[in-house]
Image: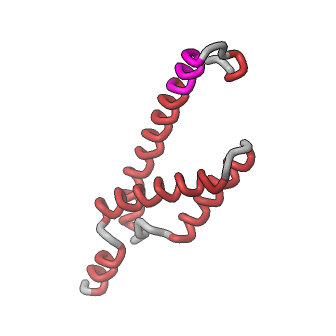
Amino acid sequence: MKPAEACQSMEELRREIDRVDGELFDLFAERMSYIRRAPALKAPSGIPADVPARVDEVVQNARAHAERRGLDPNLFETIWRALIAHAISVEEDALGPSEQREGERSSD
């Protein structure tokens, strides 16, 4: 690992960017493992895949993390909203859409 200021060529800089990208994808894979686990924990309690209050909390957390690091909070809100939309889709594939599950409960 080399700080950006220590890179003396574009080749070095690109190598470090590629290394960071690999680490980011390792973290995204870890994050997805938790997303894939969520349906098993949500189903017994009837928690839907899409919980708007939690979405808002996660988005605000992303914005705050970005701001603390001098990054554009609007950009990271956009990125996190895409991640959240994908996570909801993954959870709904496992749980079924919340509207469908509510209908199933009322017919029991």
Question: Where residue 32 sits: x, y (%)?
Answer: 42, 46
Query: Which residue does the image show at 54% across and 64% down from the upper left?
Result: 55
Direction front: furthest residue: 10
Residues 77 and 35: in front is 77
Left or right placement of residue 104 versus residue 14 in this view: left
Residue toward you, 32 or 21: 21
Relative to 81, residue 34 above or below? above
Closer-to-camera residue (56/106): 56
Examine the image and state in which quarter residue 92 appears. Answer: bottom left
- Residue 105 shown left or right of residue 83 in the figure: left
Whether residue 55 is in magenta: the answer is no
State which quarter of the image contains the N terminus: top right
Vertical arrangement, residue 6 with respect to residue 101, above or below: above
Please tell me whether residue 63 is drawn above or below residue 55 in the rendered image: above
Please, what is the dominant secondary structure of the magenta stretch? Answer: helix
Residue ranking furthest to the bottom = 107
Q: In this rendered view, identify the residue nearer to me: 54 or 21.
A: 21
- Applied colour scheme: secondary structure
Which region of the structure is painted magenta? 10-18
Give the residue at x 59% y 56%.
77
Residue at screen point 31% across, 75% down: 101
User: Residue 56: x, y in percent?
Assistant: 59, 66
Q: Furthest residue to the top? A: 8
Q: Position of residue 2 (x, y in %)?
A: 65, 17
**Residue 6 horizontal/vertical position (percent):** 70, 16
Image quarter (top left, top right, bottom left or bottom right) of the C terminus:
bottom left
Q: Residue at x 47, y 44 (%)?
A: 31
Question: How many tags in the picture?
Answer: 0
> Compared to 76, does 4 lie above or below?
above
